[in-house]
Amino acid sequence: MDKQKRKPIDLTPPGGGLLHRCTRKFAILISLLAALVVVGQPWIGSRVDEEIHAKLLQTIRDALPDAIVDVKSAERQGNRGILVTGLQIRLPLESAELGGERKSFASQPMIEIDHLELKGSTDYGTLLTDVPVFSDVVIRGGKLRVVRNADGEVNLERLLKHLSSSAESRAGMPTIRISDVDCLLADEQQLSHQELTLRLTDGVLVERERERVITEDGKSETRADLLQIRLQFETDLATGLEVQGAISLDDQPSLLTARLDGLMLDERLLNYLPVSLVDQLPPGLAIDGQAELAVQLRTQLIDLKSPHSEELDTTRWDYRWTAAGVLSNGLYSDRRLPTPITDISGTIIWQDGELHCDRMMGRFSNSPLTGNIHILPSGDSAAVKATLVAENLLVDEALARGLSGNGKLQSLSKVFDLYSPRGATGLKLTYDSTGLEPMTELSLDIHDMDVTYAKFPYPFHKISGRVIVRNRDVEVQGLEAYSHGQRFEIQGSLKDAMDFPTGWVQISADGAVPLDNELLRALKPETQQAIGVLRPTGLVWLKHLRYEYAGDKYNPQREIDIDVKSATVSYEQFPYPIHRIQGGIRLRDGVWKFEDFNGYKGNSYIQLQGQLEALAGNDQRLTIELTGTEVELDEELRTAFSVKNKNVAELWDQLQPQGALDHLTMKIEKYKSREKPSLYIRGKKWVPDDSFARSRVQINPTWFPYSIDELTGEFIIQDGHVQLLDVRGKHAQTEFVFDAVSHFNADGGWDLGIEHLSVDRLGLDNDLLQALPASLSKGLKSIDLIGQLQLSGDMRFVKPKNAPLTSSWDLKISAGGVSLSCGPRFSGVYGSIAFDGVSDEKGFRTKAWLDVDSMIWGNEQLTKVSGPVWVDSKQLLVGRWAGLPEAKQQQVDSDANGVVRQPQQATQSLLSRTAGGLLGVDMQIQFVNQLRVESGVEGAISRPADRFLLQASLSGADLGYLARQHEIKERAGGKINGAIRLRGEVGDRSTWTGEGKVRLSDADIYELPLMVALLSNLGGNLGGNRERAAFSASEVDFRVQSERFILDRIALEGEAVSLYGNGWMSFDEELSLDFYSLVGRQRLAIPLINQVVAEASKGLLRIDVAGSLDKPRVNGTAFPELDGTMERILHDLNTRIARPLPNGGEPLLQLR
């Protein structure tokens, strides 16, 4: 259902013709009552009153045929006149009026007269013989109800409209005097249930003769008389109301004037207005004040009938209202205003349908107001021209709230919402609706005000300048404002600023202001993001901010130039604070650019550039490039690395870097649609000669606590990957060169691969031993390495999430003249060993290949040493045994995976050339995690209780070379072959046990001290030929026990004589030997013959040897008796040979 349109307010009062007609017809009605007596009426005595009563009723009913008339009484007052009492006139109620809410108004009598007195001669003679003349009519007491119905019809006009024309034209009207009559005015749609009461205290209606007029032809023209009126009223709403004037009884002009003194303008007046009019008033309207008012009404009946017109009624009333008044002590308020307008005063002139309120004055929020209002007729509505001036208006939140929802000032309210002004200002408001479109203009002459612009909500203080708002247009003229001590200039011009703005707004500053949260919050969200990602602090200079609008208030073309001064930034994705920053932030074509940024972090010089740009799909891309020199590897840099990748921080914590980089480049790319940014970091440390950083770079890995100093090279970090290129460093005299690659997994794990590792002058010092795994460190420490090594190869470290660190390596260690112990002591080692191993939850293990060009063992030189080695957390295996653990592990893997593998190639013994022969070694060392406590000269000492098993063989060695190596001057020669198996604890000779054999062939040993002594005792049997008697071959079978070589069998065989015996020799070369001589060689394997020869030789010689190897003492005994020792020596010589050593395979002694 369409909402009914509200009718415009009609400020023009009802037609003056209505007032004129009703007044004149009421006077004529009273005159009719004064003409009740007809000449010659036979009134007799007591019937006079009845006749008067009947005549009165009949006269009123004839004059007012639609009225219901009632007269209580009509009596002759002697000869003085007639008194009528209780006269009531009403109109019958219609059906619509019966059901109306205001039935009480229409149902009451329209005219009630308590006393109506007709004064004149009323004696019987006059009544019977003459026409009585009533010169005066006096009305005392009564009521006159004037009611306007919903259709705008006035009941009084309806009552009098049928008054006959003949009655109106009757001449001679008595003087009418009225007193104590209540004029009750009401509208059936008014709010109040009571009528507006005007008490007529004194009134006179007198007919006056009009002056005669001489026409142009010289004739005298007579015009109808005038009805002169003077009425005085009393009312609660005013101190006095007086109406006077003259009403023409013909078509000549009439004039009425009214003067209203002390009119009370308050809410009581509103109660008498129609609801339709009240609805159009502002909500919460409240008025108060006093007024002095004068009103003039000029009316004239104009005949519009033309000679040829056949219309019966061609007349109309021409009326003109004129009013003037003075308003004082006024008050106006409605809900749109936060505070009432008080002390209202001014003049009011109403003329020709125009209302002029001039020289209006008042106060609003303690601010003086001046203004004027002109209301002009314009078609079906009224046009308004108004001006309001406030010299020092207080603008605050209350005023802003009051303007919201105000129809004609809605645009002004929106301006308040847009700029949020607070303070004092001069104001001039002009409203003009006389044109095609209403025009509202607000001019603000701002003296001291605070403003926050909604598009840039940064508070400005002490604003001065001018703002002009024309309807929906805003113009800012030379505004000056201050914020944080700096002057800002604001200019702008916007058309249709609220909905489809076109124009511009510009702000610039004379200097820098703090870059704080208040300023950041003033920017648009995307601008806040552009700057907020850097988390800046410091000073910024807003050199230029301009918004260009082309009809879209949400997407203006923006230009922003911001200079950064002495600032600090810390990018939220890489919170590395940079101080003392200078630079510029520019916005052009929707792209934010960070230009010419530079600053410092300690001694580091940092440069920064980047941009933020919008992409399709409401996406954004932020790119930042940061370049620094002499960048300290401090905790803040670590924190910056760890924000988006905790693994980098973990790697940092494990490497523990210190020092400063020469050059650091960081590139960040962040998309709004993606959670994580792309991070690229590249750092460089140049060699000292090219470096300008004053501090060196050092790392001290927690998983390998071996500090590396003077690091150079570069690293790259990108999306979870870390790459180290040409990294060089030192530890004391040790130099390192390597590349590395590290990857960080999403689950928190990481791996690190060290490639192209080259370590020069590496020594097994305490720093390195403490850094290595305990098991490896223990093994390396036991070799007691002296000298420097070279290391090369690759290493890999893997750290899964919630799992221990694992490592693997493929390394080659080269030595140049080092010395070490591996059971025996080796010196002058030149060569290399290649390691391939791992360290994981199963422990440490590695296989190696030894390739030594030369090394010294005691006084012996070993050359071309090569062979396999195995080292794990429990053991060291050399030679054939080195392949056993790997073979077992492969067998376990094969069984687990169901894969059939090819058998491994048989490993070899550790081989070496020495003394002109070939030495083969197989060895086991078991690492025992316990110490053995021993007492010595210096007190109790502790040593490892590691156990070993050694199996060695020597073939083709040169005896002469060995003699010279032991500084034996006597001539010696021959070839030595031998084998030994030895077991025990490393470093404790008392635990050593074993067995072995030595074979000497082609011997030339007769000049050796021991041989000389032996031969001396055999001299009688040799026939003086020592060379013939010299031993050319020898065999020794021995055991090792109790720090001695137990020589179970010694055979010194020569052409003439042989010596057989046994004995022992200590590790300190002390001797105790027993020999028996035999003739020739005993090589026959026939026991009977050997026994016969032995029996034949019993009587030859027994030789005892004691002393030392260098100074033996030999004693001989001729023809000895056969004793137990001799029996053992001679017992089955063929069976006393050493058992052959096993050819590889499992060791003879299984170590626990």
Image (cartoon, rainbow, N blue to C red):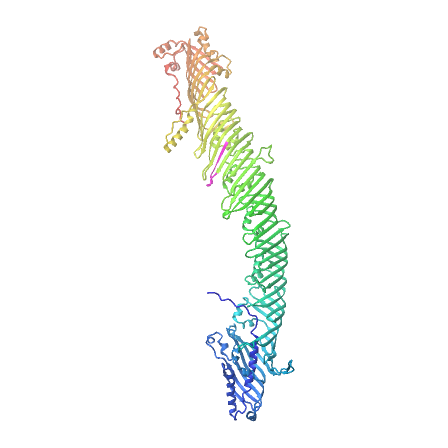
Return the residue found at the far front. Answer: 308
Return the residue found at the far top. Answer: 1023
Front residue of 496/968: it is: 496
Q: Is 752 a magenta residue? A: yes
Where residue 1063 sits, quadrant-wise, is top left
Front residue of 305/268: it is: 305
Quadrant where the C terminus is found in the figure? top left
Count the marks: 0
Residue 607 seen in the figure = yes
Front residue of 47/1063: it is: 47
Magenta region: 744-755
Note whether 826 is above or below 531 in the view shown.
above
Note whether 8 is above or below 423 in the view shown.
below
Question: Where in the figure is residue 196, as x and y percent of width and height?
Answer: 55, 75
Question: Where in the figure is residue 229, as x and y percent of width and height?
Answer: 60, 80
Question: Where in the figure is residue 390, as x and y percent of width and height?
Answer: 63, 63
Q: Is 846 a magenta residue? A: no
Residue 520 seen in the figure = no
Note whether 1124 is above or below 562 in the view shown.
above
Question: Where in the figure is residue 1024, as x and y percent of width and height?
Answer: 46, 6
